[in-house]
């Protein structure tokens, strides 16, 4: 399918120039980084910008570093870079493992985690890990820079807290100082390039603090305060897991669509929550767990 809509193309040489373009076009510009979503939208005509602003050449957005207890991920960092990063593997293995579930190798070579959260689709695979680790999105414009907690980022399907003249420059993920492990479990219809029918992410610390997040089972990805309160400070056993499973239907609001029914999504979230909790606590205890095949 050809792109029938005409637009101008800009490749700024500096971040300041990119921000000036966003100001000039008053919400009629789109940022081009990986373009894995944007290219499809342009072909389908669901977006019709006056200008594409290509930021791939801005080296200041290529950062992938551990700074002051935080993993800092620049806006141009791809999912494949996360998969292959020794730093990510050491500091936040859940991030690399969840990145591996995104689409295909070809898509991961182009798609960025910043672009993923800007797409704000309910099923995005990066959301659970960012939510359970309390990530912060750093955005900037000619008006200044601000930090948006990931819990405040997703406003509705395909709508975020990003203003029209703002650009995501990096994502910061605080890495707990205590021992911890996280697991993301994704339900798809088949192995390979598929959107999540449902997803569950959990993180547990050695102090039995738990974080739980879901994707693809509501208008936006979400954290579960009720489940976290239920689990807090307690050691997992069959009785506690049964209680946790029973709370799931009240915490999520899935729909029935062509990929899965509401009832199936609820049931599988209960199953995946238990498996994710068992896997995360097992990893924390030093057990070998195959996190790629929990569903």
Image: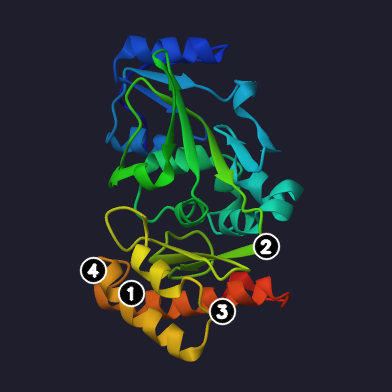
In which quarter of the view is residue 173 placed? Answer: top right
Residue 33 percent coordinates (x, y)? 51, 30
Q: Residue at x 29, y 31 (%)?
A: 47
Label 1 sits on residue: 248
Whether residue 208 is situated above or below residue 239 in the rendered picture: above
Q: CA distance from mark 2 to mark 3?
A: 16 Å
Labelled pair 2, 3 in contact (Cβ < 8 Å) = no
**Mark found first going from the N terminus, 2 or 1:** 2
Residue sitting nearer the eye, 11 or 264: 264
**Residue 75, numbered circle:** none
Q: CA distance from mark 2 to mark 4?
A: 39 Å
Secondary structure beneath disc 3?
helix
- The reply, left or right, for residue 257 in relation to residue 213 is left
- The reply, left or right, for residue 15 in relation to residue 273 is right
Residue 206 percent coordinates (x, y)? 63, 69
Q: Residue at x 39, y 79 (%)?
A: 244
Labelled pair 3, 1 in contact (Cβ < 8 Å) = no
Secondary structure beneath disc 2?
loop
Label 3 sits on residue: 278
Mark closer to the observer (1, 4): 1
In which quarter of the view is residue 241 placed? Answer: bottom left
**Mark found first going from the N terminus, 2 or 4:** 2
**Residue 256, numbered circle:** 4
Secondary structure beneath disc 1?
helix
């Amino acid at each position: 399918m050809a792109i029938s809509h005409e637009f101008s193309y800009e490749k700024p040489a500096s971040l300041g120039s990119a921000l000036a373009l966003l100001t000039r076009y008053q919400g009629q510009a789109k940022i081009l980084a990986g373009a894995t979503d944007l290219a499809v939208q342009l072909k389908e005509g669901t977006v019709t910008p006056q200008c594409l602003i290509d930021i791939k050449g801005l080296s200041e957005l290529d950062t992938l570093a551990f700074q002051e207890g935080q993993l800092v991920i620049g806006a141009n960092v791809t999912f494949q870079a996360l998969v292959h990063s020794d730093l990510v593997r050491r500091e936040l293995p859940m991030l690399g493992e969840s990145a591996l579930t995104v689409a295909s190798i070809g898509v991961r070579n182009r798609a960025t985690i910043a672009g993923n959260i800007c797409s704000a689709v309910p099923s995005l695979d990066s959301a659970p890990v960012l939510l359970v680790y309390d990530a912060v999105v750093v955005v900037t414009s000619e008006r200044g820079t601000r930090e948006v907690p990931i819990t405040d980022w997703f406003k509705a399907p395909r709508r975020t807290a990003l203003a029209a003249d703002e650009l995501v420059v990096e994502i910061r993920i605080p890495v707990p100082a205590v021992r911890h492990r996280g697991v993301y479990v994704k339900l798809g219809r088949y192995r390979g390039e598929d959107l999540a029918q449902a997803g569950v992410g959990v993180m547990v610390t050695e102090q039995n603090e738990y974080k739980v997040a879901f994707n693809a089972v509501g208008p936006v990805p979400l954290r579960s305060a009720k489940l976290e309160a239920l689990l807090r400070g307690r050691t997992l056993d069959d009785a506690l897991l049964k209680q946790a499973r029973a709370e799931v239907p009240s915490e999520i609001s899935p729909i029935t669509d062509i990929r899965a029914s509401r009832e199936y999504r609820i049931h599988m979230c209960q199953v995946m929550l238990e498996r994710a909790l068992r896997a995360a606590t097992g990893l924390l205890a030093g057990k070998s767990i195959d996190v790629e095949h929990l569903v």
